[in-house]
Amino acid sequence: MTTPYAALLSVRKIEEQEAEAVLASVLREVESLETLLRRLTEARAAWLAGELGGAAETLTGLETVERMGEHRVIDAQRRAMAARDALLDRQRQRKVVEELHLNALAAAERIGARRPQMELGDLGRRSARGIAAGGSR
């Protein structure tokens, strides 16, 4: 049995899956950027400790790239939060439609279960009227 909510439920499930994929992608990006930033920070620390040779431009370049990396991580983390919020919203929407769908199925099932009883009641009333009509002749 289908309800008016069946098609919408399918759409909501697809939207939820898409939101999950977006969140997973952004979380991978955050992890990758955090790893890159950690390496840059370690490289700067190594240069400051004298483990890496080179001019002051090396340090300046490392610090510049490190700041850029920090900004990219912050941006990716913001997108991850937005993607997480979008996923939660999609899940809520799917759950609402799913509940409406299940309620509509349950209501249809209750009506279907009562139908034979109603038909028997109708037959009984007709039969009683027939007997009453036949008995008064």
Image: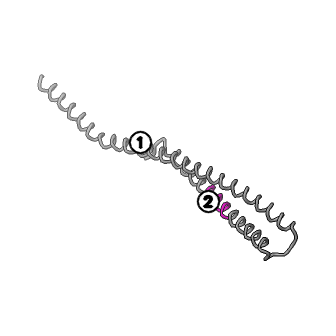
Q: Residue at x 80, y 65 (%)?
A: 62
Q: Which percent across, then down, holds residue 103?
A: 40, 43
- How far apart marks 1 and 2 lie (CA) works out to 34 Å
Q: Which percent across, then down, holds residue 92?
A: 51, 47
Q: Earlier in the sequence, mark 1 or mark 2?
A: 2
> Mark 1–mark 2 contact, CB under 8 Å?
no
Q: Residue furthest bottom?
A: 51
Question: How crowded is the residue under tag 1: few (<14 C-alpha within 10 Å), some, or many (20+)?
Answer: some
Name the secondary structure under disc 1: helix
Q: Residue at x 45, y 45 (%)?
A: 2
Lateral position of residue 25 relative to residue 13, left or right: right
Query: How many tags in the picture?
Result: 2
Part of the protein shown in magenta: 22-31
Name the secondary structure under disc 2: helix
Residue 104, disc? 1
Q: Main secondary structure of the magenta part?
A: helix
Q: Which image quadrant is residue 40 in? A: bottom right
The residue where tag 2 is placed is 24
